[in-house]
Amino acid sequence: MSHILKDVIKNISIDCVIFGFENSTLEVLLIKRAIKPEKGKWALPGGFVKKNELIRNAAQRILEETTGVKNIYLEEITIFDGINRYPLRRVFTIGYFALIKPEQYKLSTGIDTSEVKWVKLSELPELPFDHNEIVKVALEKLRTRIRYRPIGFELLPEKFTLTQLQTLYEVILGKKLDKRNFRKKLMNMNLLKKLKQTSTNGKRRPAFLYKFDKKNYERLKEKGFIFEL
């Protein structure tokens, strides 16, 4: 790294996979490295842990310092310990991932980064080190999470159509879902509030808008309810 490494643990790093959902597309936040090794290449936001900080605090700090994105919930993926994953020495990295709305965050370059941008998951370039593998593992974990926790609702507008909701899940899961079965499961969970309002998209017939009932979800969860799609 460009700054002095005397205050960091040189063999423990953190890499963050930040997924964004925009225009019916799943994207990944990348930074362009401004330092060696792999200077000039697109990579995941990452950095080394300081000697005096907790791992979770380090993840938040590193993400903010390299991309400008802050105050988001990060979930740990796993530890990546490939012997030759980093060319200069043996480095273990702790992977984190998150799912956010890109339009709510202002990107900025920071420590050891020359550019920051969103890249479509389907157009992800060859990343340095083992970053492509980290993205792959993060995506698998995300796909598991959205089946058992309603995190997908966080990416939608406050009011949304069932078509928008299904599109979100199809994009993340990478496959088509049966329309009737998907809607039947959701409605049986009693997690959606149907509104009197309809969508104003002129291209299609108006559809009713819905809201996610967070209070009811918390009440049901206390009783042992399990969200499962």
Image (tube, rainbow, N blue to C red):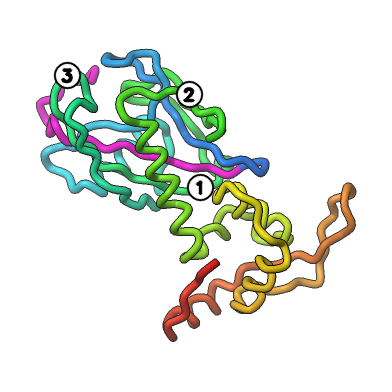
Q: Which of marks 3 and 2 is nearer the N terminus?
A: 3
Give the x, y percent position of residue 195.
Answer: 76, 71
Check residue 67 for magenta coloring: no
Please name the amino acid that badge 1 sits on. Answer: Ile
Q: Residue at x 88, y 47 (%)?
A: 203
Label 2 neighbour load within 10 Å: few <14, some 14-19, many 20+: few
Pointer 1: residues within 10 angstroms few (<14), some, or many (20+)?
Answer: some
Secondary structure beneath dot 1 equals strand
Sequence-wise, which precedes: disc 3 or disc 1? 3
Find numbered disc 2 in the image and state the secondary structure of the residue it sits on: loop
Residue 161 is left or right of residue 154, and the answer is: right
Q: Report the residue marked by disc 3.
A: 88
| In this view, 177 is above or below 1 | below
Give the residue displayed 10% in from the left and 26% down from the top.
6
In which quarter of the view is residue 196 placed? Answer: bottom right
Rounded to the nearest whole Å, what is the CA distance between mark 3 and mark 1?
Answer: 33 Å
Magenta span: 1-21
Distance between mark 1 and mark 2 Cα atoms:
21 Å
